[in-house]
Image (tube, grey):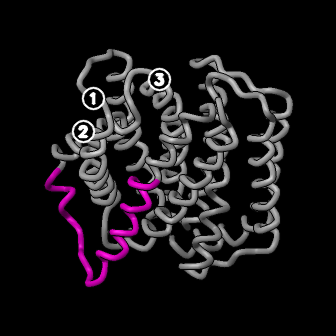
Amino acid sequence: MKGRVAECALVFAMVLWASSFIALKLAFVSYDPWTVIAGRMWVATLCFLVMWKRVMRFEYRSGDWKVLLILVAAEPCLYFILEAMALQYTSAGQAGMVTSLAPLLTAVVAFIFLKERLSRIAVFGLSIAIGGVLMLGTDGHGSDAAPNPMLGNALEFGAMLCAAICSVCLKHLSSRYSALTLTALMSFAGLIFFTPLAMTLGNPWHWDHQGVTAIVFLGAFVTLGAYLLYNYAIAHMPVTRAASFVNLIPVFTLVLAYLILDERMTMVQLGACALVMVGVGVSQMRSRKGSAQAAEQLG
């Protein structure tokens, strides 16, 4: 039963994360990236203050600070820096497409740090998918939405590597810290990190209805809602299986970018998207049985 609930939570989390690319694009029209990210962290942290007593329920173990430090350094700090920069150069649809690499990168990081098995076919699939990402950025057709897609997609790739490190850290800590506690910690760390950047490098001192609405949505629904749903799921299934749901983000993002931002892709870029998805699909071919066995062990 918990497995089904975790799967539903992941689907909703993916819809919210897909919408974040659209909201960020809209927010960046009115505000600089540092102001947008700091604002979203403030909104999320204020939401968590209402649940402060529940947030403070955790079992600290000696040495946890090291993993917690790696967690918040990877995400939100480095992750949001890279993603904010990426969306200055690439479209929401292309950035969403790059997120499909997250499961493969998570498998690599889990292999290194958690000693989870990494098959040769997974490595082969990763190679295909990376080739698709490179093809996606080298089409050579810049636009207002994607003035430098190669650079933007490379930055988004870096953000996905940070997300993979974050997923492994969450899995390591999930037995002692609730999803609520870990998400609140990430939001508060982001607030401390990005507020000085917004004050010194940004220009937050003006009001724009669309920008503020997008920031509130990002803080209350994406940072709070999606991370809570994802962190809950991580605690109830293998990390690599949970990460595979990220494959839904590109689909949701492309649809939302088309409907809301009126983004279009060339035939070459659509072919590159297909290549990325083939690579992701290949990497999952032999991992399903192992994922099912691991899920049974978790109960």
**Residue 242 vs residue 20, the one in the foreground:** 20
Per the image, the residue denoted by label 3 is: 26
Majority secondary structure of magenta residues: helix
Q: Residues within 10 Å of mark 1 (few under 14, many from 20)?
A: some
Per the image, the residue denoted by label 2 is: 199
Q: Residue at x 66, y 49 (%)?
A: 100
Above or below, comparing residue 178 to residue 275 in the picture: below
Earlier along the polypeptide chain: callout 2 or callout 1? 2
Left or right, 218 with respect to 26, comes to left
Q: Give the residues in magenta.
A: 52-78
Per the image, the residue denoted by label 1 is: 204
Q: Residue at x 29, y 75 (%)?
A: 65
Name the front one of labels 3 and 1: 1
Left or right, 50 with respect to 246, comes to left
Above or below, comparing residue 99 to residue 148 in the picture: below
Find residue 80 and report its horizontal and vertical position in percent. 44, 47
The local secondary structure at tag 3 comes to: helix
Q: Residue at x 58, y 48 (%)?
A: 155
